[in-house]
């Protein structure tokens, strides 16, 4: 026993020492990162030119192609493989390789670990602003202004709705995600209701009442999906007051918006009931309700389109058509609920930055067509709208979709996208909203009580985070 | 004799020396054998555990690397008692523990006693009871979700057939969500506990029952006077392990309710996960994990002291 203790204590000491060493080296690494980032910030031109010479040397010395590795969340078969293949054909001297990571908490942690440990990743994707901010602040992102991203964005995308950090482009969005209402055209035709091309919230509520059908075995509801009016009215950073020291839930538009959905659920019986949403986990499978005709309309975005196209899993013989989001007052300008997202970024530790930039440009422009089938609407200004529609809606488009309505509604160039830049306590506020709205939709508290506790709890979360 | 004695004296040190050598050799071989496991334990368990203790005294966002790790002393441990999420999760967890364990143990004991008698198709029934234990908690939770559906689920259909016009909404209600998860957990833990009790029953000498029969004791007396006291070591073991695992309940919560509706099913392991991986508060998350560890440790210690009063070892 004594002998064991002695050996054990030696091993323990060793272990702690090793632990201390690894911790130290970890420290060094991250401070190096911050240093190099600092350099990149201070002397972009020098860094840039260094990189240029290095790249040319890389390819010049051995005449071997430069290999770049891209990490993204879209499955290879939904476009990236084809994109990479075409890129490799058209770009001599660069070989791109795509690695897929699952865009969830585990997958993002895996990507962060790989970035921190210095694994070769030249280009990678980020799908949420909080995570993106953290990667930029952690020195994992190259300032793309070094490659004249400013001009590129202005000429090819337009600056509105594009995220900047410290007034610099560390990322460029690759897709836009417009929101709209998707409708079952057969039900509208049967009831003799015109497909709305613009509508107010009041008209929307009246139409919803008409769409309810209780004659069958199962009641058919009008709509599934909460219409976030405050977001449409207030736009960017709508959870916060101007200085982000306080939450904004005392703005009457929040209560008005929740009250509307609550009343549609409990008074009109037209919105799909929340007990069912919870019990059947419908947050994630909203398309099931629409495609099995349990609801006549749904709040929708382009990523739902592939389910409509999938007639094997969802056999149906009616046409889906599209209407813009209902607004409070016609003629006024509102935000769409969508954002520009799927941000492409360059690793600050990449050894082939020129090649990586070439790849980023290709993905954003000519390469964007390969991602259409996965429901990614390109941000590129010069994209061919017919090609986009065809790519998104598939070969069987006419039989499944009202193509003209789709073009008019979803690809409307005048949609105003949201760009949230404030992230103080955002995950906490998100959770608070879910918890409080749960209780409200289940009838366990009133809308008034809900908005009050939202305000109170979110204020506290903001205060704690600062 | 003398000669022999000398021989003996001479030879003694030799043997001792030889033995010593072989002991060291044996020790070295022994340590070599356990080295892979020990290294694995040190690097994959011990160091992370010690590191988490260190982290629990800091404010640390994993995205910002080690340079952003700020030492904050006991702040995390103090602020958890002002955190409504933490308080709600402790409350829910205590309800969960107090609700599930007595029911599971009683049901398992009864099942084991019945199965231990000569029952037709005993093995098949035993396997059936054990199935949930070896099934994936994700799959089980998905099935129970369907069973719990408030309007179309078999459970509520059955209750409505019985004449209950307003059956519980189960996981779509703050009041019933936690009981719904608890019922599923009791069902899930029953098989394992039954099998352990069955093993315990094999260890009770038949003579005790035979003499009880001679004295004219009935089934109930035998259960209360012989079976339950004789099974107390098994009960003690199950009580300790069940309490520990009930404070670690996570899988069914994550799949079925995500802590909702509201905070009605937020348990402590789920909140530790939320604050670490959703809110990126690693330090706070680690401090709650250590609080949980200390709490479980104290509860176990109390049980260990208390066992003298009711556990009979033969």
Image (spheres, coloured by chain):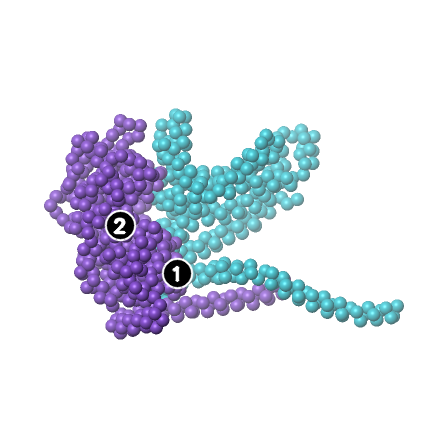
Chain colours: A purple, B cyan
Residue A366 can be seen, yes or no: yes
Question: Quick one: which residue is furthest to the left in this view?
Answer: A331
Q: Residues within 10 Å of mark 1 (few under 14, many from 20)?
A: some
Q: Specify the label residue A372 is tagged with.
A: 2
Residue A408 or residue A34, whichever sits in front? A408
What's the residue at 19%, 37% (across, down)?
A205
Question: Quick one: which residue is furthest to the right in this view?
Answer: B1
Q: Nearer the viewer, mark 2 or mark 1?
A: 2
Residue B109 or residue A117, whichever sits in front? A117
Q: Residues within 10 Å of mark 2 (few under 14, many from 20)?
A: many
Q: Position of residue B191 (x, y in %)?
A: 53, 39
Q: Position of residue A304 (x, y in %)?
A: 28, 44
Q: Is residue B45 left or right of residue A122?
A: right
Label 2 vs 1, first from the N-terminus: 1
The image quarter containing residue A297 is top left
Say whether mark 1 and mark 2 are on the same chain.
yes
Q: Quadrant of the N terminus of chain A?
A: bottom right
What's the residue at 49%, 67% (across, down)?
A18
- The answer to the question of whether label 2 and label 1 lie on touching residues, with beta carbons closer than 8 A, is no
Q: Relative to A444, is A175 above or below?
A: below
Please tell me whether mark 1 sits on a helix, a strand or a loop: helix
What's the residue at 36%, 57% (across, down)?
A99
What's the residue at 27%, 73% (across, down)?
A49
Q: Relative to B174, is A367 above or below?
A: below
Q: Quadrant of the C terminus of chain A?
A: bottom left
Residue A315 or residue A2, whichever sits in front? A315
The image quarter containing residue B68 is bottom left
Please tell me whether mark 2 sits on a helix, a strand or a loop: helix
Count of all numbered marks drawn on residues in the image: 2
Q: Position of residue A249 (x, y in %)?
A: 23, 49
| Residue topped by disc 1 | A113
């Amino acid at each position: 026993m004594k002998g064991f203790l002695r050996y054990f204590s030696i091993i323990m000491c060793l272990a702690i020492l090793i632990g201390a060493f690894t911790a130290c080296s970890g420290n060094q690494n991250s401070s190096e990162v911050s240093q190099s980032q600092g350099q990149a910030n201070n002397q972009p031109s020098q860094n840039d030119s260094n990189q240029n010479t290095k790249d040319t040397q890389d390819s010049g010395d051995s005449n071997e192609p430069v290999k770049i590795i891209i990490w993204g969340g879209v499955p290879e078969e939904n476009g990236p493989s084809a994109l990479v293949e075409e890129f490799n054909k058209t770009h001599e001297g660069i070989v791109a390789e795509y690695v897929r990571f699952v865009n969830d908490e585990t997958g993002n942690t895996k990507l962060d670990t790989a970035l921190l440990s210095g694994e070769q990743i030249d280009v990678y994707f980020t799908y949420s602003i909080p995570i993106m901010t953290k990667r930029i602040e952690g020195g994992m992102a190259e300032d793309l202004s070094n490659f004249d991203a400013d001009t590129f964005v202005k000429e090819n995308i337009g600056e509105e709705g594009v995220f900047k950090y410290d007034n610099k482009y560390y990322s460029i969005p690759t897709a836009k995600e417009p929101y709209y209402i998707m409708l079952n055209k057969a039900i509208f035709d049967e009831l003799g209701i015109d497909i709305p091309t613009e509508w107010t919230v009041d008209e929307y509520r009246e139409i919803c009442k008409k769409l309810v059908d209780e004659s069958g075995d199962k009641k058919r509801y009008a709509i599934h999906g909460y219409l976030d009016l405050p977001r449409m009215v207030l736009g960017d950073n709508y959870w916060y007051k101007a200085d982000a020291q306080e939450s904004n839930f005392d703005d009457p538009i929040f209560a008005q918006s929740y009250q509307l959905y609550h009343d549609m659920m409990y008074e009109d019986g037209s919105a799909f009931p929340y007990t069912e949403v919870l019990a059947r986990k419908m947050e994630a499978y909203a398309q099931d309700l629409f495609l099995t005709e349990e609801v006549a309309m749904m709040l929708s975005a382009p990523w739902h389109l592939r389910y409509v196209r999938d007639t094997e899993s969802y056999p149906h013989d009616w046409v889906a058509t599209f209407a813009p989001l209902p607004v409070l007052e016609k003629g006024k300008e509102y935000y769409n609920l969508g954002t520009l997202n799927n941000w492409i970024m360059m690793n600050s530790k990449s050894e082939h930055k020129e090649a990586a930039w070439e790849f980023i440009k290709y993905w954003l422009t000519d390469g964007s067509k390969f991602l259409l089938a996965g429901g990614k609407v390109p941000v590129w200004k010069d994209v061919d709208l017919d090609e986009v529609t065809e790519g998104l809606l598939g070969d069987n488009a006419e039989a499944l979709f009202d193509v003209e309505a789709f073009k008019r509604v979803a690809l409307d160039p005048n949609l105003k996208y949201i760009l949230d830049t404030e992230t103080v306590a955002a995950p906490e506020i998100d959770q608070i909203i879910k918890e409080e709205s749960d209780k409200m939709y289940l009838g366990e508290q009133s809308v008034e009580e809900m908005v009050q506790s939202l305000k109170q709890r979110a204020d506290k979360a903001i205060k704690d985070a600062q | 004799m003398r000669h022999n004695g000398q021989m003996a004296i001479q030879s003694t040190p030799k043997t001792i020396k030889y033995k010593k050598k072989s002991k060291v050799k044996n020790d070295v071989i022994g340590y070599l054998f356990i080295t892979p496991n020990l290294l694995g334990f040190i690097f994959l368990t011990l160091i992370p555990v010690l590191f988490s203790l260190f982290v629990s005294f800091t404010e640390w966002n994993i995205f910002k690397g080690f340079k952003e790790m700020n030492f904050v002393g006991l702040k995390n441990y103090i602020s958890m008692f002002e955190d409504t999420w933490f308080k709600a999760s402790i409350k829910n967890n205590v309800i969960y523990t107090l609700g599930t364990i007595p029911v599971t143990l009683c049901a398992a004991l009864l099942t084991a006693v019945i199965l231990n008698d000569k029952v037709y198709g005993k093995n098949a029934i035993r396997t059936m009871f054990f199935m949930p234990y070896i099934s994936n908690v994700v799959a089980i939770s998905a099935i129970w979700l369907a069973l719990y559906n408030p309007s179309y689920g078999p459970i509520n259909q059955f209750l409505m057939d019985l004449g209950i016009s307003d059956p519980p909404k189960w996981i779509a209600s703050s009041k019933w969500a936690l009981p719904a998860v608890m019922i599923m957990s009791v069902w899930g833990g029953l098989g394992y506990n039954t099998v352990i009790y069955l093993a315990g029953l094999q260890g009770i000498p038949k003579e005790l029952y035979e003499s009880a029969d001679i004295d004219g004791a009935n089934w109930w007396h035998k259960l209360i006077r012989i079976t339950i006291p004789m099974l107390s070591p098994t009960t003690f073991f199950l009580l300790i392990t069940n309490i520990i695992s009930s404070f670690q309940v996570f899988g069914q919560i994550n799949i079925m309710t995500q802590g909702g509706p509201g905070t009605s099913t937020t348990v402590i392991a789920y909140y530790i996960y939320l604050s670490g991986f959703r809110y990126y508060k690693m330090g706070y998350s680690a401090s709650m994990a250590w609080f949980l560890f200390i709490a479980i440790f104290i509860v176990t210690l109390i049980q260990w002291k208390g066992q003298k009063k009711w556990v009979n070892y033969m």
